[in-house]
Image (cartoon, rainbow, N blue to C red):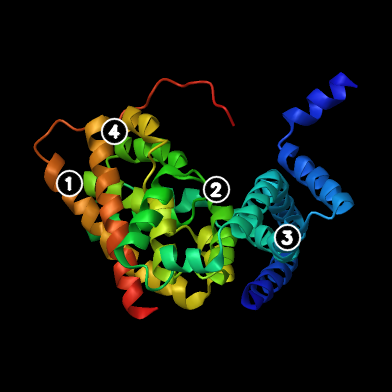
């Protein structure tokens, strides 16, 4: 019995289980706030559970059909506008959180990518990923997504330029930290 | 939302016609991602359900609504900077907040800082770029996010 409890406590579903128990007990004692919370939860849950699987299928298909390798080949070709465009394109094809972009930034640096383009890559990676945009359009609408994309693009290009201006005369380099045990 | 379902359907049909094997592995990959994120989705929904019960709609609208001004933007920017929420969950969460009275410009700031500013991941970032450069990048992104919010506020 103790083992089972420990097993449940270790799963990521612990909060969901506690929540279920809370709702059940509240029902018995007719605890009014729980009804509102439950109604809230149910409304959100139904919407998520009907749409999310389809969106993730779209993300999965996207990943299979758009090989990043083809774009990666062009990285480092010149640091001008062409290099910037390839960096943004590569970033748009990625998925994952910002800290996943740092190792790629190191690779870009190794391949001879300019400072400006490395920071533009980070900006594009965090705000213009295509799988992310599909979610954004789905949940917040096309108008908001388009507007945010159009406004964001010049902002992080400017950040890239500022970083380059600041770092031009300094000894800047991107380092690869020693591989640590990943907690994933 | 409907556009996306249609898009998924079209993509699925096109993919199936061109390569059945690839399609299956794509679907598998997507569903694996979904199952992996499911507990986090549930946890966030539970917390939001409780949060929206505890915080009345009027308070939320006052703090983060259309007329919240600079205060709303700052709250969103700070929250976005210190949180670590997977982006696939950010949007469902944002949609709920939008329905609860949070304005588009506040959401834009929240999303942008969430994506571009990482206080918790700063130590990791510093290992790649050095502490000083990382701090500068984060501060610039923070300011950038506020500008993005202000510009979006003009249109939406």
- State which chain disc 2 sits on: B
Q: Position of residue A155 (x, y in %)?
A: 27, 61
Which residue does the numbered mark 1 point to in the structure image? Answer: A164
Secondary structure category for the residue under label 4: helix
Q: Please name which of the two marks, 2 or 4, marks the residue nearer to the observer.
A: 2
Label 4: how many Cα within 10 Å (few below 14, some 14–19, many 20+): many
Residue A17, image quadrant: top right
Q: Please name which of the two marks, 3 or 2, marks the residue nearer to the observer.
A: 3
Secondary structure category for the residue under label 1: helix
Left or right: B117, with B132 as reference point: right
Q: Position of residue B106 (x, y in %)?
A: 40, 64
Could you tell which of marks 1 and 3 lies nearer the N-terminus?
3
Which residue does the numbered mark 3 point to in the structure image? Answer: A45
Disc on res. B129: 4
- Report the front residue among B47 and B145: B47
Q: Please name which of the two marks, 3 or 4, marks the residue nearer to the observer.
A: 3
Q: Are marks 1 and 3 on the same chain?
A: yes
Q: Please name which of the two marks, 1 or 3, marks the residue nearer to the observer.
A: 3
Q: CA distance from mark 1 to mark 3?
A: 45 Å
Q: Position of residue B83 (x, y in %)?
A: 47, 44
Q: CA distance from mark 1 to mark 4?
A: 13 Å
Q: Are marks 3 and 2 in contact (CB under 8 Å)?
A: no
Q: CA distance from mark 2 to mark 4?
A: 23 Å
Disc on res. A143: none
Label 2: how many Cα within 10 Å (few below 14, some 14–19, many 20+): some
Which residue does the numbered mark 2 point to in the structure image? Answer: B86
């Amino acid at each position: 019995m103790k083992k089972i409890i420990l097993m449940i406590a270790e799963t990521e579903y612990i909060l969901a289980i506690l929540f279920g128990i809370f709702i059940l007990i509240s029902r018995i004692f007719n605890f009014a706030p729980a009804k509102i919370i439950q109604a809230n939860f149910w409304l959100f849950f139904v919407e998520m559970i009907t749409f999310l699987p389809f969106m993730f299928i779209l993300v999965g298909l996207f990943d299979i059909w758009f090989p990043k390798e083809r774009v990666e080949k062009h990285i480092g070709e010149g640091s001008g506008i062409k290099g910037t465009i390839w960096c943004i394109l590569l970033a748009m094809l990625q998925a994952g959180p910002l800290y996943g972009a740092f190792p790629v930034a190191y690779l870009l640096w190794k391949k001879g990518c300019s400072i400006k383009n490395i920071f533009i890559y980070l900006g594009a990676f965090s705000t213009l990923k295509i799988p992310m945009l599909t979610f954004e359009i789905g949940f917040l609408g096309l108008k908001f997504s388009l507007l945010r994309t159009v406004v964001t693009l010049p902002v992080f290009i400017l950040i890239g330029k500022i970083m380059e201006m600041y770092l031009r005369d300094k000894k800047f380099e991107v380092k690869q930290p020693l591989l640590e045990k990943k907690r994933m | 939302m409907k556009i996306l379902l249609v898009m998924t359907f079209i993509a699925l049909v096109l993919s199936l016609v061109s390569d059945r094997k690839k399609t299956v592995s794509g679907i598998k990959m997507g569903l694996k991602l979904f199952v992996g994120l499911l507990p986090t989705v549930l946890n966030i929904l539970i917390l939001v359900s409780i949060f929206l019960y505890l915080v009345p709609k009027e308070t939320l609208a006052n703090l983060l609504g259309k007329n919240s001004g600079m205060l709303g933007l700052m709250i969103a920017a700070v929250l976005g900077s210190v949180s670590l929420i997977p982006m696939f969950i950010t949007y469902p969460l944002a949609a709920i907040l939008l329905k609860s009275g949070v304005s588009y410009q506040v959401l834009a700031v929240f999303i942008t800082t969430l994506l571009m500013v990482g206080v918790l991941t700063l130590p990791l970032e510093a290992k790649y770029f050095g502490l000083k450069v990382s701090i500068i990048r984060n501060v610039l992104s923070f300011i950038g996010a506020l500008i993005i919010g202000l510009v979006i506020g003009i249109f939406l």
